[in-house]
Amino acid sequence: MPVIQVDLQQVLQRIKSSCLSFFKENFNTNSLISAIFLSLPIYFQIFNPSLILKALSFISVFLGFWVLLNKKTPLFGFGFFIGLFWFWWIGLSFRYYSLGWMIPVVVLLVATGYGLIFWMIQKLLLFFQKILNKFYEFDWYNLFLIITLVFFIDYIKPFTFDWLKFDILFLTFLPSISKWQFLFFLLGLWLGKKNKIFYLLVLSIFIQNYQKPKNTMNIYLATTYVPQNLKWQKSYIPKEIQNNFRIIQKAIKEKYKIVVLPESAFPLFLNLHPELIQKLKNLSNKITIITGALHYKNKKFYNSTYIFENGKMKILDKHVLVPFGEYIPLPFFQKEINRIFFGGASDYSTSDKFETYKIDGKNFINAICYEATLEDIYKLPPKNIIALTNDAWFMPSIEPLLQKLLIKYYASKYKKNVYHSINGYKSYKICKK
């Protein structure tokens, strides 16, 4: 039997050469510049809104898309840097599982994942251009890229995570944006290179149907700043509970009808604490209380919303969980991953559907954290959404800024009123009804 000799140095040299060739083909300064400009408007939201920042956001969006459409921009590199600049914070939650070393690994995996998604998009667009050019010579690539950015990116949801929506960038300087405005904007940038008259299409984004929102409801949105490393410590929980009751009493004193506390404001299985439940029921005769807490039922764990009104209690469980945060979206490896990385913890259970409830004669949709950024919840009939979030997992980062832009986008699109109570970031209401 012949012996196959392998020249290890030669193999390594080929691998090195292949890697260099790949990086040279798929990364350049244009992919980096475009991604930077299309990320800056999100980071501008860290500062208080002003006309200067809005103008800078518009310029940044203009330049980012102009470079993407009019320069040789490898989409793998573009997607890699977008994944990096938009979603570097995803791995931060691993700090609280003593897995800090996983953060750079997760960052690299996320960035590479988006790089591969855009690389496949580019290959597909080039394939269609090659076929169509046999019939008619045209820049089909950029036309299809524009259509993809406007209409098809929304359908790219790795593990149900669909936070990559370029539409939200326009909300850093506009009250709303439609798909058709986005389309005309990109067409103007692309066609304007050949004939500057087409740049007038860019101005279509400023055609707005301004509507003054109606008076909002008398709701007190609590903001808390409990660090995640303290939130679940037994010695700190009594302090959190005491602060929750202080917030409720403050809302009562200020004559609010409803008080909303963040996700997991009570960091325990609240239904297993009858003394706390009774205290909240008693207070609910003065004010309706909506708060986040855990729920234990039939040997299952739920992330839930508790509603106390007129001495009665209702529990609404979360319907859609955070991938890799509240459940492992890999059915064959759930137990193994939970055992290796999360100390054997079980995934959360869920309700069968998004749930609604009625307070003071008005219908509300229940949204817990991640759910508030899902389009499906905005398609439900009630015009009001109460959302509870714990953003301390990802602080400090741009995660709450992205979350707010997504909520603003859907609230505008579906004409909803969103009341959002948060731990780790300032609570807010977005009223579009």
Image: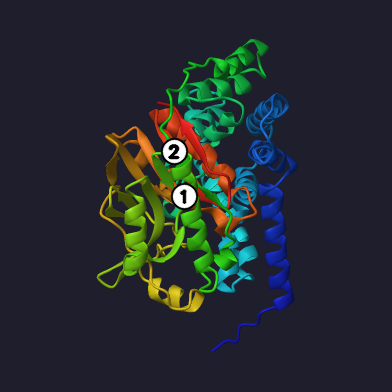
User: Residue 158 at x, y = what percent?
Assistant: 45, 52
- What residue is at 28 percent from the left and 47 percent from the top? 310
x and y, in percent, of residue 417 in the image? 41, 33
Q: Position of residue 279 (x, y in %)?
A: 36, 59
Residue 264 lies in quadrant: bottom left
Q: Which residue is located at x 48 percent, y 19 percent?
A: 212
Q: Label 2's element? A: loop
Q: Is residue 142 above or below residue 82?
A: above
- Of the two numbered discs 1 and 2 on the same chain, state the one appearing first in sequence: 1
Is 380 or 257 nearer to us in this picture? 257
Res. 99 image quadrant: bottom right
| Residue 101 badge | none
Query: Which residue is more in the foreground, 220 or 106?
Result: 220
In the drawing, what numbered circle is on residue 255? 2
Q: Residues within 10 Å of mark 2 (few under 14, many from 20)?
A: some
Quick check: 425 left or right of 128?
right
Q: Is residue 60 above or below residue 229?
A: above
- Furthest residue in direction top, as rendered: 197
- Kindly state the secondary structure of the residue where label 1 is placed: helix
Q: Quadrant of the N terminus?
A: bottom right
Binning the other alpha carbons within 10 Å of mark 1 as few (below 14), some (14 to 19) or many (20 upward) gives some
Tell me the residue that label 1 is attached to. Answer: 249
Q: How is the image coloured?
A: rainbow
Residue nearer the viewer, 285 or 205: 285
Between residue 196 and residue 134, name the one nearer to us. Answer: 196
Q: Are marks 1 and 2 in contact (CB under 8 Å)?
A: no
On the picture, is 24 further left or further right than 321? right
Give the Cα separation between the discs numbered 1 and 2: 10 Å
Name the amino acid, label 2. Lys
Amino acid type for the residue under numbered disc 1? Gln
Q: Residue at x 53, y 14 (%)?
A: 207
